[in-house]
């Protein structure tokens, strides 16, 4: 009999690690300033919170489901619908692993050196791209080995990652409050206009703000990934929905408050303004912001200039180390949960017996094959030259929409679930059916509009190829699913 090992605290930390990304706090402020805090609250109300409660109800209704979202969609709609949805969903995580296995070395470099030095890394005569490719492939191998040894191993990893992110958030919010109290005013001027208008000149038009809504959907998605842990959770009918609900509320509060507090120690024009010659981009903005956090805290405490500079460097180092732990935790979850739902939840006749082999409650052979596929892509990009990188960018474009499209599948399945009432559920957030239907329509509209704009945005810049690939990707993935 399978032992259920996940307690409420373990589940909350695993959800938090899988979804919450500390970098999104300074990144959001860099893109839209205080306005992002308001935007985050609205986005959570229109997508993240209602979707999280849908996941909680579905998880409570199917406490023994090994197939996670596949089981939910198959029971609520039909197996073919579910298989198309989970195949599209799974493909997006392959791209996620490819990206994360390479960028994860930036925060560890920052933790060690105080700045990103990955471009100077050379292993055995290889250039920096090839060196990172070898490191990324090695990381996939190590995490797959650890994850395949059972829930007990990666539960500890994800818990450490979740605690690191919670502590980093607490330091930012608490330190920001201290800086405000000591200075007597926020470093970024606060007004009604600043709450609705971005200081970033790239995000002042209606079209640019709409493009940010797409980023918000991508940033706050992923809560459904832990649906594959329902059958590993103690007292799942009660623990699973409580864990999802607590995590969703915690993430909402930390994001909104964290973005707002960033303005207490960050003057946007001085720290982020490209016109001043600063080299700020979406790869280093978090470390620049946290370096500034430590520096401003030192000045507010009336330390010397040199001490304040050192506080800035160590703040960036700490965030780099915390981000490394969090990404390792998230990677560990992603390495097993999607493939577990795909192989264990779908009809057995689809997969060879070899791929369905179980050990420690996980499809270990399927995880190894997955690792081989990811490693081949990593090495192809690292050693394949310019053409390989172009191919990889095309793959990313094909999976951009695939990352958010499954939310439409799950939301519609929830609507059918409430309409048909196939099984009793121990947790009901939407007490009336009409409330569930309204929430479903809001999620469908929010995600649908975000996807539509994702596809249209490149066309507005004359990039028809990228838009075409975004549409072509899900069509290809859905066709493959229908073929099987």
Image (cartoon, grey):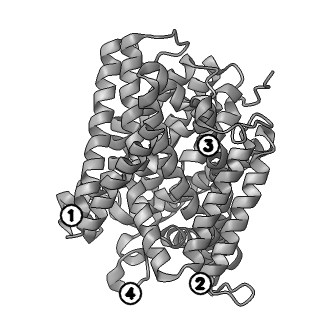
Q: How many labels does the image show?
A: 4
302 with respect to 415 (left or right):
right
Measure the alpha-carbon separation of dots 4 and 2.
21 Å
Between circles 1 and 3, the one closer to the viewer is: 3
Local secondary structure at mark 3 = helix
Q: Nearer the viewer, residue 133 or 50?
A: 133
User: Which residue has dot 4 on it?
Assistant: 277
At which x and y percent is residue 406? 42, 39
User: Which residue has dot 2 on it?
Assistant: 119
Measure the alpha-carbon separation of dots 4 and 3.
45 Å
Between circles 1 and 2, the one closer to the viewer is: 1
Label pair 3/2, CB-CB below 8 angstroms: no
83 with respect to 320 (left or right):
left
Q: Is residue 298 above or below residue 123?
A: above
Q: Earlier in the sequence, mark 3 or mark 2?
A: 2
Q: In this view, does 200 lie above or below 278?
A: above
User: Which residue has dot 3 on it?
Assistant: 339
Label pair 1/3, CB-CB below 8 angstroms: no
Measure the alpha-carbon separation of dots 4 and 1.
30 Å
Residue 221 visible in the picture = no
Measure the alpha-carbon separation of dots 1 and 2.
33 Å
Q: How crowded is mark 1: few (under 14 residues within 10 Å), some or many (20 or more)?
A: some
Local secondary structure at mark 4 = loop
At which x and y percent is residue 483? 44, 40
Label pair 4/2, CB-CB below 8 angstroms: no
What residue is rendered at 29% in x and 32% in y?
442
Quick one: quadrant of the N terminus?
Answer: top right
Q: Earlier in the sequence, mark 4 or mark 2?
A: 2
Between circles 4 and 2, the one closer to the viewer is: 2
Local secondary structure at mark 2 = helix
Which image quadrant for residue 264? bottom left
User: Which residue has dot 1 on it?
Assistant: 459
């Amino acid at each position: 009999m399978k032992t259920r090992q996940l307690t409420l605290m373990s589940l909350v930390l695993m959800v938090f690690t899988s979804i919450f990304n500390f970098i999104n706090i300074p990144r959001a402020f860099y893109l839209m300033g205080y306005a992002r805090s308001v935007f985050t609250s609205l986005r959570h109300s229109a997508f993240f919170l209602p979707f999280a409660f849908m996941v909680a109800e579905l998880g409570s209704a199917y406490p023994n489901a090994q197939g996670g979202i596949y089981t939910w969609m198959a029971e609520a709609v039909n197996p073919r619908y579910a298989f198309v949805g989970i195949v599209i969903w799974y493909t997006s995580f392959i791209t996620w692993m490819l990206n994360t296995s390479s960028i994860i070395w930036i925060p560890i470099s920052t933790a060690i050196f105080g700045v990103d030095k990955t471009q100077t890394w050379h292993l055995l005569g290889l250039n920096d791209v090839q060196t990172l490719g070898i490191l990324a492939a090695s990381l996939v191998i190590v995490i797959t080995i650890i994850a395949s040894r059972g829930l007990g191993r990666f539960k500890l990893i994800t818990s450490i990652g979740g605690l690191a992110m919670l502590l980093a958030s607490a330091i930012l919010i608490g330190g920001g409050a201290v800086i405000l109290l000591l200075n007597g005013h926020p470093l970024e001027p606060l007004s009604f206009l600043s709450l609705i208008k971005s200081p970033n000149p790239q995000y002042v038009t209606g079209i640019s703000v709409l493009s940010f809504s797409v980023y918000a959907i991508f940033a706050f998605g992923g809560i459904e990934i832990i649906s594959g842990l329902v059958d590993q959770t103690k007292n799942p009918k009660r623990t699973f929905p409580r864990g999802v609900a607590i995590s969703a509320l915690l993430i909402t509060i930390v994001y909104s408050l964290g973005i707002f507090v960033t303005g207490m120690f960050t003057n946007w024009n001085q720290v982020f303004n490209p016109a001043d010659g600063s080299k700020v981009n979406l790869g280093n903005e978090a470390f620049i912001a946290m370096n500034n956090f430590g520096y401003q805290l030192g000045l507010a405490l009336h330390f010397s200039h040199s001490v304040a500079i050192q506080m800035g460097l160590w703040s960036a180092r700490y965030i780099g180390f915390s981000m490394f732990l969090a990404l390792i935790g998230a990677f560990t979850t992603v390495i097993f949960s999607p493939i577990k739902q795909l192989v264990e939840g779908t009809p057995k006749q689809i997969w060879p017996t070899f791929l369905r082999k179980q050990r420690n409650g996980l499809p270990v052979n399927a995880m190894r094959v997955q690792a081989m596929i990811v490693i081949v892509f990593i090495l192809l990009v690292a050693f394949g030259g310019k053409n390989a990188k172009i191919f990889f960018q095309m793959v990313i474009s094909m999976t951009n929409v695939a990352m958010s499209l499954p939310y439409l599948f799950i939301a519609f399945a929830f609507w059918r679930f409430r309409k048909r009432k196939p099984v009793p559920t121990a947790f009901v957030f939407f007490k009336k059916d009409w409330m569930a239907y309204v929430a479903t329509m809001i999620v469908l509209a929010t995600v649908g509009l975000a996807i539509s704009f994702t596809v249209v945005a490149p066309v507005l810049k004359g990039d028809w190829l990228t838009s075409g690939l975004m549409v072509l990707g899900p069509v290809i993935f859905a066709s493959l699913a229908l073929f099987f």
